[in-house]
Image: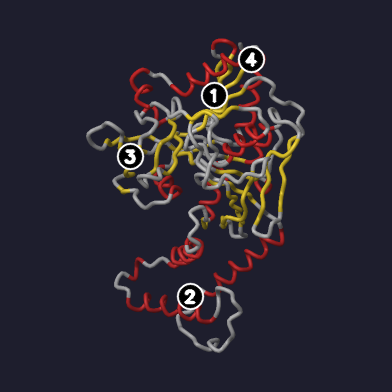
Amino acid sequence: MEEITREKKRSFWGGILAGVFVTGTLLTILFIILLEKETRLVEQRMSEVTSSVKVTGTTTSSDSSKKKDGSLIDSEFTEKADLIYNSVVKRFYFEEDINTDDMKENMYKAIIDSLGDKYAEYYTAEELEEMFMSSEGVYYGIGAYVMMDEETGYPLLTKIFKDSPASRAGLMDGDIVYAVDDENLFGYKLDEAVALIKGPENTNVKLTIYRENEPDYIDVTVTRGKVESPTVESEMKEDGIGYLQITEFDDVTTEQFYKAYDDLNAQGMKAMILDLRSNGGGNLDTVLKIGERMLPKGIITYTEDKAGKREEFKCKGKSVIEIPLVVLTNGYTASASELLTGALHDYGLATVIGTNTYGKGIVQTIYPLSDGSGIKITTSRYYTPNGVCIHGEGIAPDIELEYDSELYSTEKIDNQLEYAMDYLREKLK
């Protein structure tokens, strides 16, 4: 597999692996940009913030007459910040608890939080390093995919990995994490919740779980461990129908997909089911490489920023899939998985079965800073080959079919998968 340096890696993050596997921030399309000019500008601004809140021990008003230039950092800001800081130092009863480094970090976070963009983040150096590592497919945690449940406001375990710490502890797909070590998670961002779930190898974490049809909350203790992300599963089913599931687009996914896809073809695959249910996204480069094995020559996706600048990502079209194809989707099919679904559908190569996808069609850019920290903000929208932006809308299935969870829990029958099998059998007649 071609080596991709961290500096050049573009990510379409959707899912968050718990443990976790916590993939990036959930449902986030990321472009990691290290263009010298842009990075230098951000670093300059951050340097201004750092110098402006530097502790001096005194307040001054010598710059109060300076004109404001429209920037955030001016004399009024610095005077007020110094006033607040010195008031805390002189009057705060628990002075020994003051941590000036935390104060500064929280100020940086507050600037980004004030944008009101749920996908925007300020990362400390440690948080940014963890975010980069999460795209590689190796994690330390419990081994589960985690997404934020929009209805409850709590993290939802969408998939438990086989033979993972989470699986061994008895956690199940669909469990809602109410608390971590007795810390209620309501109001937490996904990254914040996942940070509590993750931890060093061989340490324990207590998850308080809400599980449907259970009369009360369940406490589950999980021993964290090293987990390699099994992002692709495949199986040759009856009648020559190949089943291939991608749970996330990590660095490791490309080779896992190639191996599984080639193996199914070697077994004489006549039709294929691509299962992208609960796939929250991942690396753009991974999606593009997978697209090269299935899509015709042309645009896979393109982006446009607020100035209308367009960037296209194209396929060479040397290996187009020619057998009947079904893509399975649900409400947690998001970001990069929507991109692949949209491209396959726009080129008429796939029938989409399931429920409407999540609708994540905006791009976040990460600006790494020289001190190791970084900033992520929304910078553009992405579009399917036919020019459709699915943000807030999602992709509607060709055949809408709700997942029957009760049928699966009682009889282990996946009604959506069974319907797709029957659909392809008809196509093969």
Q: Residue type at mark 4?
A: Lys
Determine whether, in the image, residue 280 is placed left or right of residue 427.
left
Q: Residue 92 placed where, x, y %?
A: 32, 74
Which quarter of the rendering shows the N terminus? Answer: top right
For discs 2 and 4, the disc positioned in front in the rendered view: 4
Q: CA distance from mark 3 to mark 4?
A: 44 Å
For label 3, the residue is 207
Q: Residue 146 placed where, x, y %?
A: 44, 39
For label 4, the residue is 270
Judged from the image, the secondary structure of the residue bearing numbered disc 1 is strand
Q: Residue type at mark 2?
A: Val
- Which image quarter: residue 150? top left
Q: Earlier in the sequence, mark 1 or mark 4?
A: 1
The reply to whether residue 190 is in sight is yes
For label 2, the residue is 55
Q: Earlier in the sequence, mark 2 or mark 4?
A: 2
Q: Residue 66 placed where, x, y %?
A: 58, 86
Q: Nearer the viewer, residue 294 or 161?
A: 294
Q: Earlier in the sequence, mark 2 or mark 1?
A: 2
Q: Residue type at mark 1?
A: Glu
Determine whether, in the image, residue 178 is placed left or right of residue 385.
left
For discs 2 and 3, the disc positioned in front in the rendered view: 3
The reply to whether residue 19 is in sight is no
For discs 1 and 4, the disc positioned in front in the rendered view: 4
Mark 2 and mark 4 residues within 8 Å of each other at the beta carbon: no
**Classed neighbour count for the residue bearing mark 2: other residues with Cα under 10 Å, few (<14), some (14–19), many (≥20):** some
